[in-house]
Image (cartoon, grey):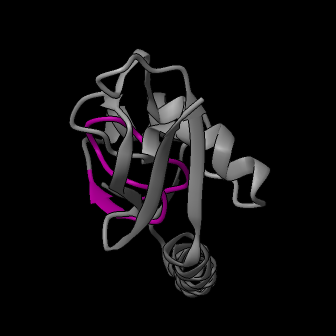
Amino acid sequence: MKVILKEDVKGLGAAGDVKEVKKGYAENFLISRNLALMANDKNMKVYGDFKRSQAKKQEKEKETLRQVADQIAALTCNITAQAGEDEKLYGSVTAGDIADAMKKLGVEVDKRKIVLEEPIKKTGVYSVPVHLAPEIEATLKLWVIKQ
């Protein structure tokens, strides 16, 4: 039986996908829990409209993320931290610290999008990659300054 998924179903597919499943699974689980619709002519037309609206929505989101990436690339972020004589920090600068500093500059990014191989433990200038989406990445210029 063919169904159109209304929501993401783990192990089956994403919202809007047309999948072939067993009749019992479709009727007793997917349709009864409002996770899918039967793939008849009427629902397939609605599905086409849904796919087009989803594509437009995703394109708008990507455009917004590209603008945020441009803002991040233009930023120079400064973080002050206590450091010893050999420029080693007493603590470390983490992705959360960088996200907080960026928020103060007007660009809000989730700390999980900031990619650090390891926490920053010395003063200096760093290029920090920020993965906003699979194909959208920006590089932030970060200055870690001794307090």
User: Is residue 13 among what the camera can see?
Assistant: yes
Q: Quadrant of residue 98?
A: top right
Picture layout, residue 147 above or below residue 47: above
Query: Where's residue 56, x and y in %?
Result: 60, 87
Q: Nearer the viewer, residue 16 or 138?
A: 138
Left or right: where 103 falls relative to 75: right
Q: Nearer the viewer, residue 30 or 93?
A: 93
The stretch drawn in magenta includes residue 8: yes
Q: Quadrant of the C terminus?
A: top right
Query: Where's residue 89, x and y in %?
Result: 40, 20
Query: Where's residue 24, x and y in %?
Result: 34, 32
The residue lying at 32 percent from left, 64 percent from top is: 134
The stretch drawn in magenta includes residue 68: no
Q: Quadrant of residue 59?
A: bottom right
**Total of numbered circles in the picture?**
0
| Residue sitting at the far top | 90
Picture layout, residue 112 above or below residue 121: below
Which stretch appears magenta?
A: 4-20
The residue lying at 38 percent from left, 37 percent from top is: 123
Left or right: where 62 falls relative to 60: left
Q: Quadrant of residue 107?
A: bottom right
**Which is the main secondary structure of the residues drawn in magenta?**
loop
Left or right: where 48 falls relative to 113: right
The residue lying at 44 percent from left, 28 percent from top is: 94
Query: Where's residue 33, x and y in %?
Result: 59, 32
User: Is residue 32 among what the camera can see?
Assistant: no
